[in-house]
Image: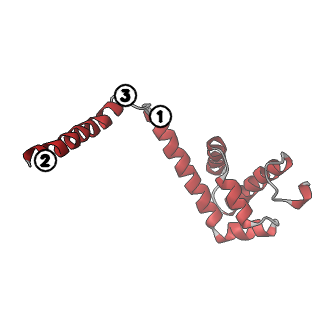
Amino acid sequence: MMQRICRIMNPLLIVSLIMGTVPLAAQAQPSQLISTQTVLNTEQVNTDRERIDALLARADVREQLVAYGVELPEVEARVAALSDQEVHQMAEQLDNMPAGANAVVGALLTVFIILLVTDLLGLTKVFPFTR
């Protein structure tokens, strides 16, 4: 009876010991390290995207976009597809705009120009008059 238990337990113990050491061997090589600057850039891009999304969520901005003939889901999709560099440029333009009502118009004009350029390049199809 004892020999039978040992025959069953020995392979199970060997397998459990091997399985316990495999993750240690896999973690011996560290993955790619992330620099502090990379983390800061990612945080800045996330902050910039949140600012642009907050601007587009405003009712007056949405009304003005509709007045220009732009479909809101198309704008949201295009803004979501912006590269990190484009998001940063757009956020810088928002920072350089004067405060008040002109800022909204300027921001809308910036979004309109970006969408117009991407339409002319064939990357989006927001405005029917660019085809």
Between discs 1 and 3, the one toward the N terminus: 3
- Mark 2 and 3 residues: CB-CB less than 8 Å, in contact? no
Q: Marks 1/3: CA distance? A: 23 Å
Q: Position of residue 95 (x, y in %)?
A: 61, 49
Between discs 2 and 3, the one toward the N terminus: 2
Q: Estimate how packed mark 2 is, as few (under 14), some (14 to 19) or many (20 or more) residues with alpha carbons within 10 Å.
A: few
Q: Amino acid at mark 2?
A: Ile
Residue appearing at x 22%, y 37% in the figure: 14
Q: Secondary structure at mark 1?
A: helix
Q: Secondary structure at mark 3?
A: loop
Q: Nearer the viewer, mark 1 or mark 3?
A: 3
Which residue has dot 1 on it? 37
Q: Position of residue 113 (x, y in %)?
A: 79, 51
Q: Nearer the viewer, mark 2 or mark 1?
A: 2
Which residue has dot 3 on it? 29
Q: Amino acid at mark 1?
A: Gln
The label shown at residue 5 is 2
Query: Residue lying farthest top?
Result: 29
